[in-house]
Amino acid sequence: MKKRYWLFAIFLIIVCFIWGNSVLSSQLSSEISMAVGKFIASIFGTGDSTTTVGGLSVRKMAHFIEFAALGVVASLLFKRFLKNKGIYVLVLSLCGVFVALMDETIQIFSNRGSSVRDVWIDVLGYAAGCFAVALICFVIAKTKNKKENND
């Protein structure tokens, strides 16, 4: 299968994972966060409780990391499909905001409520993933240009 189709499949899996966690009840979500918090705390030590590591909330870290992964995959995926840089940036940006807003909207319907702070954390994680890809592509392009100029 072509690389872009794999990227699309990974993109869908990450979105389903994010939205699937939002469908969970608050009790089940808390239990999962506690289990992950205990696992991470066993490695790095605890913060204020088992749902924090070094003072950072496991849930907030998870939001950031999930969306950073989505940003990386979306950047690579849309780079393959969208050749116009303006359209690429627009679609890439709107995708991150849309997924973050839908994530919080789903939580309203699962009786967990929504949080503007979580949307910001999601968008910042997404932007960090996109930035990481842009930085790596920039470094690769500079290295390639330098090599070509030396030859």
Image (tube, helix red, strand yellow):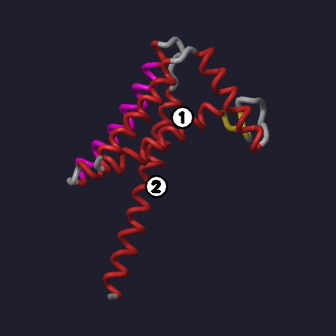
Name the element at disc 2.
helix
Count of marks, rendered view? 2
Does the CB distance between marks 1 and 2 fall below 8 Å?
A: no
Is residue 42 something one can see in this rendering?
A: yes
Please determine whether, in this image, residue 90 is positioned above or below residue 147.
above
Q: Quadrant of residue 149?
A: bottom left
Q: Residues within 10 Å of mark 1 (few under 14, many from 20)?
A: many
- State which tag comes first along the sequence, 1 or 2: 1
Residue 12 screen position, x and y as percent: 37, 34
- The residue tagged 2 is 132
Residue 37 image-quadrant placement:
top right
Residue 89 visible:
no
Main secondary structure of the magenta stretch: helix
Q: Secondary structure at mark 1?
A: helix
Question: In the picture provided, is 122 more to the left or to the right than 46?
Answer: left
Instruction: Please give the range of residues in magenta.
Output: 86-106
Q: Could you say which is closer to the camera, residue 135 or residue 115?
A: 135
User: Which quadrant holds residue 8?
Assistant: top left
User: Which residue occupies 61% across, 17% down?
Assistant: 28
Q: Which residue is mark 1?
A: 63
| Magenta-colored stretch includes residue 92 | yes
Q: Position of residue 71 (x, y in %)?
A: 42, 44
In the image, 68 versus 77, the foreground residue is: 77
Q: In the displayed structure, does residue 83 sit left or right of residue 108?
A: left
Query: Left or right: where does residue 145 sit relative to residue 36?
Result: left
Q: Residues within 10 Å of mark 2 (few under 14, many from 20)?
A: some
Observer-nearest of 121 and 132: 132
Q: Is residue 73 left or right of residue 37?
A: left
Q: Residue at x 43, y 62 (%)?
A: 136
Is 147 contained in the magenta span? no
**In the displayed structure, would residue 17 be above or below residue 141?**
above
